[in-house]
Amino acid sequence: MAKAVKAKINGILLTVPVGTTILEAARNVQIKIPTLCKHPDLPPSASCGLCIVKVKGSNKMLRACCTPVEEGMDIITHDPEIVDIRRTVIELILSNHPNDCLKCGRNNDCELQKLVADFGIREESFAQFLKNLPKDTSTNTIVLEPQKCILCGRCVEVCQDIQDVWALSFLERGIETRISPAGDIQLADSPCVRCGQCSAHCPTGAIVEKDETNKVWDALQNHDKYCVVQIAPAVRVAIGEAFGFPVGANLTKKLYALLRRLGFKAVFDTNFAADLTIMEEASEFEERLLAGKRPLPLITSCCPSWVDYMEKFHTDMIDNFSSCKSPHEILGVLSKTYYAKKNNIDPNKIFMVSIMPCTAKKYEIGRSDDMFASGLQDVDVALTTRELARMIKQAGIDFNSLPDEESDSILGEYAGAGVIFGATGGVMEAALRTAYYFITGKELNKVEFESVRGLKGVKETEIEVAGKKIRIAIAHGLGNVEYVLKKVREARNNNQELPYHFIEVMACPGGCVGGGGQPYMVTDELRIKRAEGLYQDDRDKQIRCSHQNPYIKRIYEEFLEKPLSEKSEKLLHTTYKARPTYRK
Amino acid sequence: MYTKTILLKDTALFQEDRTKEFYTTLLNQLREAGLHDEVQVVRVADIGVYNRGIVLKVLPDNIFYADVKEEDIKNIINETIKAHKIVDNIHLKHEAKQIRIVLRNCGKINPESIEEYIACDGYAALKKVLTEYTPEKVIEEMKKAGLRGRGGAGYPTWMKWKFARGVVSDEKFVICNADEGDPGAYMDRSVLEGDPHSVIEGLIIAAFTIGAPKGYFYIRAEYPLAVERIQNAINQAYEHGLLGKNILGTSFNLDLEIRLGAGAFVCGEETALIASIEGKRGTPRPRPPYPSVKGLWGKPTVINNVETLANIPVIFVKGAEWFSRIGTQTSKGTKVFAVTGKVKNSGLVEVPMGITLREIVYDIGGGTISNKPVKAVQTGGPSGGVIPVECLDTPVDYENLQKLGSIMGSGGMIVMDEDDCMVDIAKFYLKFCVEESCGKCAPCRIGGTQMLAILERISEGKGKIEDLAYLKRIAFAMQKASLCGLGQTASNPVLSTIRYFEAEYKEHILDKKCASHKCASLATYNIIQEKCKKCGICQKNCPVNTIAGSKEEGFTIKQEKCVKCGRCFEVCKFKAILKG
């Protein structure tokens, strides 16, 4: 079979690899065919009907999103007839949509709105058919507004096939069709793990993060509150997209400046806590590997959706989970204990805001009693990157021209290892740097582990530490978990040698850089660029390993004693329990 | 030794079967005539004629008698049995223009007996194919025969088989699409119930050709008897070594299984059907890849409709050449139609392709019951269109029907006379598609709903003249931008009625009138003073008190408040209310 096909699009000759769809091929020749349902991450659902094109010799119109270019095809993507049909279909979609853009969570950032503007639709030709469907706010993390749904199917696809969660599905049929958890229950009672990938892929405002910016504004204006803030690794390389920065631009220092301008009294960095997580987790790994305390493989636990998923679907792995809390929770508890004490602030007054690339963090801050280890709620509000972008705009701050500032010491000081947490494989790489040192007592000559980087769904590799082969696996996108865990179970059931010693899982494809709370329309291309921003930050750091971070050493000396000490266990660790997949 | 067979069936409801006494009388009279050793009488489950009382078929003469009473028995014995003559007054003539290929065994054999099927050349084709043919030769033969899919689109069956055969795969599947869903269509059901083995035989040949070791019958659950008969036939086929391992001593293996459909119309669409068998929501997926390349569980799959499959054994017994002589240049063989509506002889007919609609409606169907002129014929079910009386002389084949704005479809044919309103008909079919839309793609889901709303507006007298343009605009978008056949064709009934009966639409919109009085909201009621006996019953029954007057002065209907309920019209004993 030929490897490439030749065809014509709007008269332009082109050669594309076999299997390239008309939609992709058209982009190669600078032609954009509109679509509302096709997302680069997902297989075509072919539901919106906007990408129709003409192919000479066929009296049908074909969908560009799912039709591969064939040898000799003569394709027309735009002519008055095609454009008119597209306009009719958009008008039909509008007749079944609330069109209350001004009050919508996606105002100005909505794929439907943009198309309507592009097509210059000025009047409503058709009668309005509105579904009277209630909002679902039950998860407190993402809000489902089925009324605004155009049934593109992206959320269902991502929830079922990419994430393997199966919380969302279609109910009813015909004009009554709607998205909902199967059985018409509330999202919070469904298997939903709040990863928010549905919201990140939704073209309209049908699924958005729960907006909690008002809570933060209120706290910032409350003189009784001492507002502190932290930013997660992946936020700094994505927020720029909302302000016209190149994708992957690292805006850490602008963010520090910005957050102070917003009124935060202290600006911390989750990366500091990531370094601390590594200290604890690497010690835990060392303990499991060498002392045989608790079973291997050790599985990372810093992703709250992954934790939720495990507690619902893979409870036989509870003992394998690192008991270490996620970094922002660790920073939360330290701000209300260590930092409060050191600076003589009443912990009751401290209001901790986490800026996260993630919707599930909103759930995590109340996940169990362990999230109140300081005696208070350790993190008061978790905002997504998207919410912070809105706050910046509301505050009228010219983000683009802000000068750089530094974070507040010591909870803002990080090593290169901490920042790569935001990319898939990053936690593993950071942990290996430190675990190597813990186990061998020697520093690595080369701290980069290229084999754990990149967007391959499951990465398996072997690393030699002190003459011992450490087998590791990294999965991102919950749909990839099954493959890894199945191998572990099979070995366990057959009393064979374990396939892995250490497993990293991130719920979202690409890790946190592709998180459910990040700016919209993420693609693999963007994920790679965002991750590259993090790896560059790592390279730029003088100190690249968590255990070398002097401030980490200091907090152990001043407060936590040593990794896995009684105090560390109490403040920095948590427990897991089985949760029902369906509640009620 | 029997020389003649009389098949006997009561076309009334099963519970009202009146053949028992008739059967006894018939047997007695045959015995009296000394013919009881020559004439066999069989009571059958289905005879292919409906709503015509007791129906007899005399074999081998192939004479049908309908609405037969006990007093006709004497004539039948004297004329037909003894003298080979036809008794005119009860003779059902429609057989003359029919050729029975698909329905060859229906009503003739006991569908629960594989032996009877085998006695009628059953499984002879399979034996021939397995022993004498290579799969390539089967495809060659099918190409020569020119059989096209009877499910609606008319895709050449041999091409489907060839594509699936050509794909290298560890697994392949064949599926019999028995998800018949067009309103008023029941040909597949009749074949499944009346001759299940012929469908199975066709499916086995298909499986052999593409090299599939596994096949499914996808039958809608509303056809319990069909399911039972197919299951029974599958069991018998296993017992006779026609299914399972080493079929007929060859190395070919095939297992068949039934899957029930829950009655969603869209599941008759290939890809939705596959999704349904896979246990998923029954919605279509984009094609390509076509099922013959990537079908059930991602494997090459051939899906053929019941009627298509029932044709196949005959093609191999009688030869492709014989088959291809029937029909037109592009459409070979016969087509079964379920002729219903205002026609005298409603029922299943199997006619050669190329027959004109007029022949079907008048010569076989006997014209309209009302004796009023035929106004139009609707073919192709909800995906089809309305063909006006001017076009009745068109020879029926795939291309011609399409040119007329309709389709062959699965074979529904509804005859309409002057009392049928075309807006109402369009609304009926569109409503069906709107209700059956799976909701996946926007053009079908929303477009259909919008069109229906416009039609409803028109039939309520609230239409605007721009509505016609809106209807056409949405219809065009649905045709071009819907994902599957359901949405692409859902607007056909509307477009074809606008094409041929635009004046009728305009009458509804501009004059607020429905000439056939079907659109209730457009009716007006008036009292014919000459006929009115001033009894006042209309006034008493009017729910909105819009009938003024008294028993002394007489009554008038004030139109402003009238809600067109028709109550006055119904209660007037003197036919003094004029509905207009």
Image (spheres, helix red, strand yellow):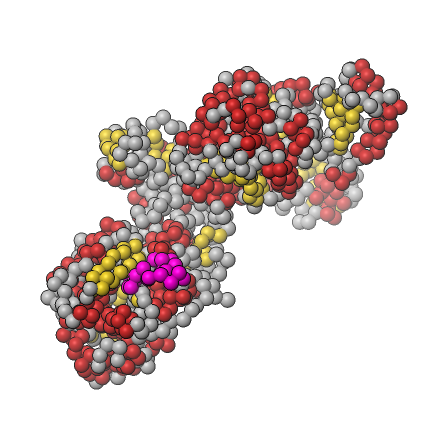
**Residue A339, image x and y in percent?**
22, 80
- Position of residue A325 relative to residue B259, above or below, is below
Q: Is residue A505 magenta?
A: yes
- Position of residue A369 relative to residue A312, above or below, is below
Of residue B554 and residue A12, the one placed in the foreground of this image is A12
Which stretch appears magenta? A484-506
Residue at 77% in and 36% down: B17
**Residue A484, image x and y in percent?**
34, 57
Residue at 28% in and 73% down: A291
Residue at 13% in and 67% down: A443
Which of the image's four quarters has the N terminus of chain B? top right
Of residue A150 and residue B73, the one placed in the foreground of this image is B73
Side of A361 relative to B182 (left or right): left
Q: Is residue A59 among the parts visible in the rendering?
A: yes
Q: Is residue A400 among the parts visible in the rendering?
A: no
**Residue B452, image x and y in percent?**
51, 41
Side of A555 relative to B197 (left or right): left
Classify residue B507 by image quadrant: top right
